Amino acid sequence: MKLHTLMTLALIGTTIVACKPVPASQQTEEINDATTPLHLLKPEYKVPYGELKAEDVKAALDRIYTYIEAERPTGFVDADGNVKGISGDDAITKLPEGYTLQRGAFRIGSYEWGITYQALLDAAKTTGDARYSAYVANVMSLLKVAYPLFRQRDAAKADIEDAQMKQIIYPYALDDCGTMCTAMMKYAKDNADAQKATAPAMPLDSLIDNYFNFVEFGQMRISSGPGDELFARNRPQHNTVWLDDMYMGIPTLAYRSVYTGNPSFSDEAATMYKSFVRRMWVPERQIYRHGYVEGLRQQPTYHWARANGWALLTTVELLDMLPESHPDRPFILNQLQMHVAGLCAYQSSEGFWHQLLDRSDSYLETSATAIYCYCIAHAIRKGWIEGITYGGVAQLAWHAISTKITDNGRVEGTCVGTGMAFDPAFYYYRPVSSAAAHGYGPVIWAAAEMYALLNEWHPRTNDSGLHYYEQKQTNPSPLFYVTSDGTGEAVE
């Protein structure tokens, strides 16, 4: 006799319906194994769990877009606070003294916003909503106009007066230029019009080349010999390697190859990737350390979540950018698969990851969780990892992230900008803030990729657990058995 028939007989005379279980805390009569299918009792999850619709993800994405669009700068501000635009009859052709770039809640030339631009471009592609790419186009138009105006006005001065424009015109670190350069190249490649100059703007390539020149020639590097080279800093110690710099520079090198057709940049990116892995990867845990000091026998090893996110995102970006025939692809793909497996071992019951991955008493953090969500979902869609194995991990992460998106579109629970220390207290007590720009790009990227994943795969609950199916299971009742025709067999 089939299991569902036995369960149907067991339920005769009870008021509890198997397909609509009641939480244990709300039961009004005594329950036991003889009267109730206990395995169908609804758990009291701390975050949403179970089936998810693409339109729900899109609604969360739209809330974030509405917020950041309202904060988007549109022009210049004079000493009295009046805004001057970049088009129309009153457009500025020469920048007067006292004028600055209009400010919103976020710096439009920061590395965090370089990530946000890339996420918005992908969101426009996966959802078909052109508002997201229009946001990027509007900012790029502003920067094309602003770049020559500030250079011209302040040419005779010792410094660029506006701090935002100084970061753009004279980058001082990878943080100032890497992700912005990649975002601009991606935008320019997608939009031929972005390469056209309209007075007094310069071609977007002028900004791209300015950024890339620093990535290629301005940033400090270290090497132990042929075939080994990577970005480093004299901060906080001499010859310190930051895991963050994998993402701040390597995808820029790789996409430069896509953008220019010069394969040498792909080779440079792959060489540098392997150099980072040799120093930063901790194989027994299958995650990365945050910092490494060249020459130390005992390395400081703290597994900061967002830095591991930068490493995972670098791996995914490289697999997107490198040619299929590149000799280092198998190494990079294997590194992705090991890192995903290692990270999944540390995911919390609420779907988030902890600030320090292997320390469950450190707080749950949003931006890292969003990066992992995006990368895992993207890797599933690309066929690099198994959707059946990891689809539920990505979705649980999204459910967690969704609880941190406020009604007005702000992203909560994000660790603020973080340097490096060699003790745990530093990481445990980093503040969190919805003003931290680090959360917005990753959450937009996660939303875009989950939207696409939900349109390609078919998540369903089976015996109360979430599962991802390549074939849609059409039975509307709770599933127990998967059938070859996709109808599924349910509890009656």
Image (cartoon, rainbow, N blue to C red):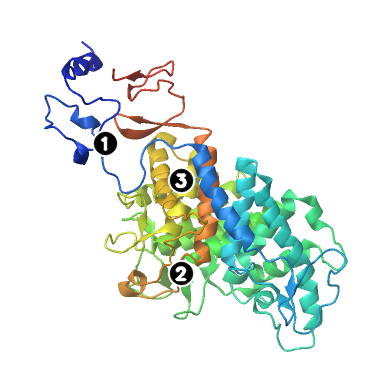
Are there few (<14), some (14-19), or many (20+) residues within 10 Å of tag 3? Answer: many
- Name the residue at the top extreme: 1
Q: Which label number is shown at residue 42? A: 1
Q: Is residue 490 above or below residue 28?
A: above
Q: Which residue is mark 3?
A: 376
Mark 1 / mark 3, whichever is N-terminal? 1
In the rendered image, residue 332, in percent from the top left (x then y), is placed at 50, 50
**Residue 447, position in %: x, y?**
52, 47
| Rendered image quadrant of residue 97 | bottom right
Q: CA distance from mark 2 to mark 3?
A: 24 Å
Residue 345 position, x and y percent, is 32, 49
Callout 2 amino acid:
Val
Using the rendered image of the protein, determine whether residue 249 is visible from the camera's viewpoint: no
> Label 2's element?
loop
The location of residue 360, given as percent across then percent down, is 27, 59
Q: Are marks 2 and 3 in contact (CB under 8 Å)?
A: no
**Residue, x 77% and y 65% (percent of image)?**
144
User: Mark 2 highlights which residue?
Assistant: 416
Q: Nearer the viewer, residue 487 or 412?
A: 412
Task: Find residue 288 and report its image quarter.
Answer: bottom left
Q: Nearer the viewer, mark 1 or mark 3?
A: 1
Image side of residue 194 versus residue 483, left or right? right
Distance between the alpha carbons at the discs numbered 2 and 1: 36 Å
Look at the picture and state if 101 lies above or below 49. Answer: below
